[in-house]
Amino acid sequence: MERIRSPRELEEIRQEILRGRDPDKPCITICSGTGCHAYGCERVTEAFRAELKKQGLEKRIDLRTTGCHGFCERGPVVLINPQKIFYQRVTPEDTAEIISETLLKKNVIERLLYIHPGTGERIVREDDVPFYKGQMRIIFGNNGKIDPRKIEDYIAIGGYSALSKVLTELSPEEIIDTIKRSGLRGRGGGGFPAGVKWESCRNAPGGKHYVICNADEGDPGAYMDRSLLEGNPHSVLEGMMIGAYAIGSDEGYIYVRHEYPLAVRNVGVAIDQVRECGLLGEDILGTGFNFDIKVNRGGGAFVCGESTALMASLEGQAGEPRAKHIHTVESGLWDKPTNLNNVETWANVPLIINKGVEWYTGIGTETSKGTKIFSLVGRVNNTGLVEVPMGMTLREIVYDIGGGVPGDGKLKAVQTGGPSGGCIPESLMDIPVDFDRLTEVGSMMGSGGMIVMDDTTCMVDIARYFLNFLKDESCGKCTTCRDGTRRMYEIVDAISQGEGREGDIELLEELSWVVAEASLCALGQTAPNPVMSTIRYFRDEYEAHIKDKRCPARVCKALITYVIDEEKCTACGRCKKVCPVEAISGEKKVPHRIDPEKCIRCGACITECKFDALEVV
Amino acid sequence: MITFTIDGYEVEGEEGQNVLEIALDKGFDIPHLCYHEALEPYGACRLCLVEVTRGNRTRLTTSCNYPVLEGISVQTSTEKVIRARRMVIELLLARCPDVPVVKDLAREYSVGRPRFKLDNDDCILCGLCERVCREVVGADAISFLGRGTDRKVGPPLEINPKACIACGACIYVCPTDCIKLEETEEERTIVRWGRTLPMKRCTVCGRSFAPWFQLEYFRTIAEGIPRDFWDKCPDCR
């Protein structure tokens, strides 16, 4: 794209792009987010491309690959615009039919529609799919409208107009005031008011100032930052530019996980594009504002998502946190004032500038404004990325959007906040989700992980899983986090093995208190949350493991036995065949038996049995 | 001058100083294993915990890396401090049950047999060796390796550290005495790092006194000292 020298030129280019586009022109939009990639969207795209060519329709029908649409459960997802017909689980074999039937003859293909699990109704339009209906996709929704590698697409939907506005109409102080009044809080976990942070950083003496985008998303199962960077990198860049101008910074960094190759590539392409057209670099839009962004790839340590560890890593040192008695806004990267915000926080900024404080503060709760993107995963029908206004209840998210728990399962708990978050029991499903309520009930917002658990989930096992993660991901610097999380893991592991002792729960509580109070960084300070919240709400499960040597959810392998119900067993021999350790014996017409000594409790026999004859006790 | 209080006593410090150094200077008893006055505070062992009140907020924090700030109030032995410190000692004792300095602390704080599985380690990962080598000696021969429970200190790739001058500063600062030195007339070995260097003899008395490599390193970095200074043993200088 040619160089854009002024806000006016930006507007002219936008109008030119829009003039060249017909909103009614048919367009096949294919989600190319991480989930759909795993489902093979690339082959679907290729099939569409080949088919359009074959039928000579390349000029008449647009083909657009976009970032993640969120409904990963039903991928590959294809949207037929302008009607917004929603096709799911699309295969390369469906593409010819979609073109000939839907695009040419305007017929809907029933087979590819989403079926409402409750009513059995087939839903045609994306907006009517319950998964999307309950959401408010002000940040994430643009993913479906743009090709992340085409800056024209972003400009067409109003991109960089917020930057243009702040550079020409607002002083840095006014921008900071706007962000402060918007109530925007950091989406990376802490929930610190972004405007206050920006102000402290701007006011900090020390010459050069830095801004950083934290894209070191490391919570297991969380991928909203990834999907934003992959699907709409320009929105993050624009947010950073506005922040840099407000803070007085001319240099920014994006610290992104090396394990996110598509995000690294797309943000790299986006930076090249804005640099080429002069929206990044020197004298941006002819206003004298200079700013540039570098991308740094993280090496894969969870702790590098912690701001001081991230900065140490950027400096080329080992990613270890330091005490924050002197805040990073005063002394951060290379001891200079540094403002770090998370991907989603930055992406909120252009929106606030464009739509205004009043509009933004109209969304959310008293203390938490705007929306939040969650990765809804686990025992829930509609897994994917969901963006909801702050204050929506957990129940609404899990049932209305998530479609509830699959099969006969009963909702037991929702784990929020990543590995250092907590488990919220079913009885608290009606709490509104915002920063403060989640903290009150012993969990946290974190970066937005949301794992749904049903009655087949053992809470001791869950605590064990997260502790195992945390003990490995602790940097190992301070005693309480390094040895404390390891000892907590050992105790919980012993409990799950049936080796728990009287007093273990109290020892866990004592240890949790010290690790939370005395650790150096937020990783250690929040590491006990999985243990504390499961003890708080599911103490009886711990007691069953310790006192009765029983796992109520029948998960902990050392505490369960597989048996065959002789009444139901038809001696068909299927279980015997599938057992990997030859633990099942029995002749024809004689009910089979399992040798508990040999059995490794893998569950293969249960899956195989057609007569429901296997039981876990 | 920055004025604040420790256990109710008014004390003074200067900008850039930390709470622990002022407290130790005045004779307050705060245990610490990863702090050394010649090195940057690190905050790893978590023994020097105190309660600091700043404004209307009181929190538990390590004093070694807490900067002296005007008007703060430091409490060195509240119930909370002792409770947390005892658990830290229990964790360290479980890690290193045979290390005298940890055993002494356990005795002092009435910490009995740890309620955790006992390891048999001799290093508490305080990082003093790594810091003295980097900050004071300037050799930067060893560093932390691995993370989480796999963390340890050693030379890069755990092979013979070419940057180590076998000066023994790491041995000197180690609180658990886990770095051993073996020395003959001919050579000196830092056992833990696997570094062996030949010794140099004094040009005056002929006695073997320090690794040749170490003396040459000092000759290159020390300014204003006569060049032949490093050829003589401390007795003959």
Image (spheres, grey):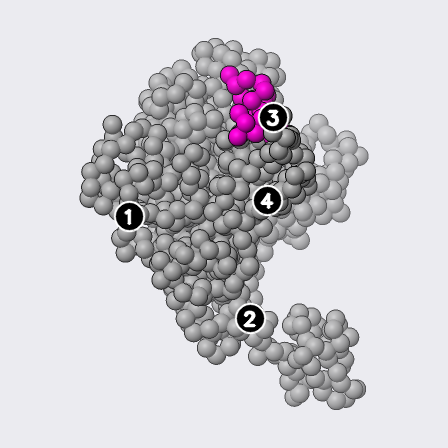
Q: Where does the image place residue A136, in percent across and percent down from the top left?
A: 45, 43
Instruction: Give the residue at mark 2.
Output: A497
Q: Nearer the viewer, mark 2 or mark 3?
A: 3
Instruction: Report the chain holding disc 4.
Output: B
Instruction: Give the residue at mark 4.
Output: B181
Q: What residue appears at the point 34 percent right and 32 percent down from the top-left corner?
A: B17
**For mark 2, does the 10 Å Cα neighbourhood hold few (<14), some (14 to 19), or many (20 or more) residues?**
some
Q: Where does the image place residue A226, in percent across and percent down from the top left?
A: 56, 39
The amino acid type of the residue labelled 3 equals Val
What segment carries the magenta color? B213-237
Q: What residue appears at the point 64 percent right and 85 percent down from the top-left corner?
A: A565
Is A212 located above or below residue B52 in the figure?
Answer: above
| Residue B76: mark | 1
Choose the circle earlier in sequence order: 1 or 4. Answer: 1
Q: Secondary structure at mark 3?
A: loop
Instruction: Answer whether labels 1 and 4 touch (C-beta < 8 Å).
Output: no
Q: What residue appears at the point 65 percent right and 34 percent down from the top-left corner?
A: B199
The amino acid type of the residue labelled 1 equals Thr
